[in-house]
Amino acid sequence: MLHRTTFDWWSPEERALAVEVNAFADSMRERNMAAMWSHDVPRDTIAELGRRGYFGAVIPQAYGGMSPGTGDATRLSIIMEALGRIPGATMAFGVGCAFHIATHGTEDQKQRWLPGLAAGTTLGAVAVTEPYAGSDAGGIATFARPTPGGYLLNGRKRYITHTGLADVYLVYAATSTDPASVKKRTHLSAFLVPADSPRLNVERLYDLGGSQYLRNGVLHFDDVFLTEDAMLGAPGDGWSVMTGGLNVERVAVACKCIGMMGESLATSWQWLRRRWQFGTSLDRLATIRARMGTALAEGISVRTTAYHAAHLLDTGAEGSGLEASAAKLLAAETALRGASTALELMGADGYSRHYPVFQIMQDLRLYQVGAGSNDVLRGLIFRLGEKRFVEILAEEPMAILPPTLTPITAEPTSNSLTDTILRLLAETYRLHPGLHMTLPDLRRRLPAVDVDSADFAEAVDTLESKEFVSVARRGSDVIGLRPTYTGLDAAHDSAYFRLIPDWATDLQ
């Protein structure tokens, strides 16, 4: 449904790919929807995905993939959106392992793994999460200890997609316990672990609330021996390897969610056109149209956001991780809301497994926590936004006040530094009662004063000792000042702060 729209910035190859992969999705919908009734892994679909080359979306052409070296995020997102329309197909479509090998692997590692991964004859899996380390990936406890000829890997990984099916696992493990390394995130390393490695066992398979055709479970590494050439990147590169592909993964997952949402809306819309109540088909009722229209508007908006983020990644735009994270967060939540709307509009039929809407909604719940928990992403988006807009955020908020309350001039008002600071704080109180002045505010308003000097610090200490100012500190650093009531009284008489509008004649 939503997938029918292309974007002006797509290349002819990307447009052709969208047509091709969506035609494939149409041809496989019935087969894969049947997988909802069992824990059936759609192996024939996996094989067909490989034959069509879709697993090679981010693998260079030299190793059997589709990538010419550009457009990886958009290409992968187009494929993921289309396969998101097929329950089961995208769940089995894991390219994270291939992406990291293509980006960080040695030539021998690329030759060994990438052709099979591109063809779908080799399945890869990424193993980050552990029983005691989820969103806090820096707390990984699985450890790789050096031993003659390589490493011994010990630990557990859980919620691993393709547990027991993958041919190779990309495993992140600690290789150092040095506190300095842990603080700098250089204590982790990445390893390519063949699934047939001795002493690597499947400890558990989960029966998930959704995605019943997704094999997911716990891996146990019990003195698994890895040769030195199993390491992906250098020792201590694990964190950078792990985070290096997150932005591409997030926009691809965003588009996957949009594909799932589009399928649920299309199913509901088709049903509504054929369900007659109150003398008409339900799609003619104003309340139905309003809800479906809202869902459609949200879907179109977030889809544009996601593909714009993919375009930024492909063009190397600086700081595009902000858009990628925002796209994943918004798409996951919008898609779940849209699928819920589709279910509710279909009534009991929507809740029945006879139609795919309920299953899609259940599967979409995974992406509130998968590919980066949405709650964690909110904090990340805030930090990235704060970094991008730091210059704007450092400015004082605009205060719309009468001309009589314009800020004081930038020059000190007396020979006393303490008096100058206090008077400026009092004047700021008239503009922004209740707010602190930050050090950047003071630098702008007092350019003749060195705010970072010992003299300034001494003046602030003097004002604080007299209880004329309140000082906000982060650690030992002063980050803001505001006048106390005592300080305001010391700076000016009460008439100075009086602001009564002309229309309040009884208070004039």
Image: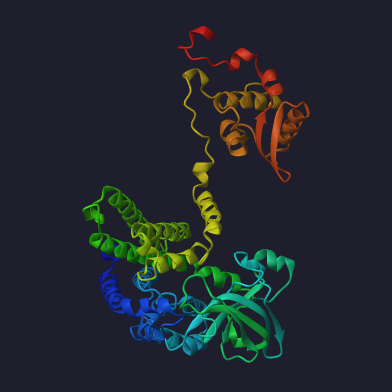
Asked if residue 471 lies left or right of residue 86, the reply is: right
The structure residue drawn at horizontal position 40% and vertical position 83%, both measured from the top left corner, is 46
> Which residue is located at x 56 percent, y 58 percent?
376
Query: Which residue, as the protein is rendered here, is positioned at the far left?
Result: 279
* Closest to the observer, 232 or 307: 307
Residue 191 seen? yes
Confirm whether residue 67 shows in the render.
Answer: no
Q: Residue at x 70, y 35 (%)?
A: 471
Assign the N terminus to one quadrant of the image. bottom left
The image quarter in which residue 119 lies: bottom left
Asked whether, in this view, residue 420 is left or right of residue 114, the answer is right
Q: Is residue 189 above or below residue 262?
A: below
Q: Is residue 149 above or below residue 368?
A: below
Instruction: State the image coordinates of residue 91 (x, y, percent, origin top left).
Output: 44, 75
Q: Nearer the viewer, residue 498 or 340?
A: 340
Q: How many numbered discs? A: 0
**Residue 467's spot in the image, x, y percent?**
75, 27
Q: Is residue 111 left or right of residue 188?
A: left
| Residue 295 sits in quarter | bottom left
Most foreground residue, 345 or 250 = 345
Q: Is residue 202 above or below residue 313?
A: below
| Location of residue 275 in the rendering, given as x and y in whole percent from the top left corner | 26, 60
Q: Residue furthest front?
A: 278
Q: Residue furthest right?
A: 465
Q: Position of residue 218 (x, y in %)?
A: 60, 79
Q: How are the residues colored?
A: rainbow
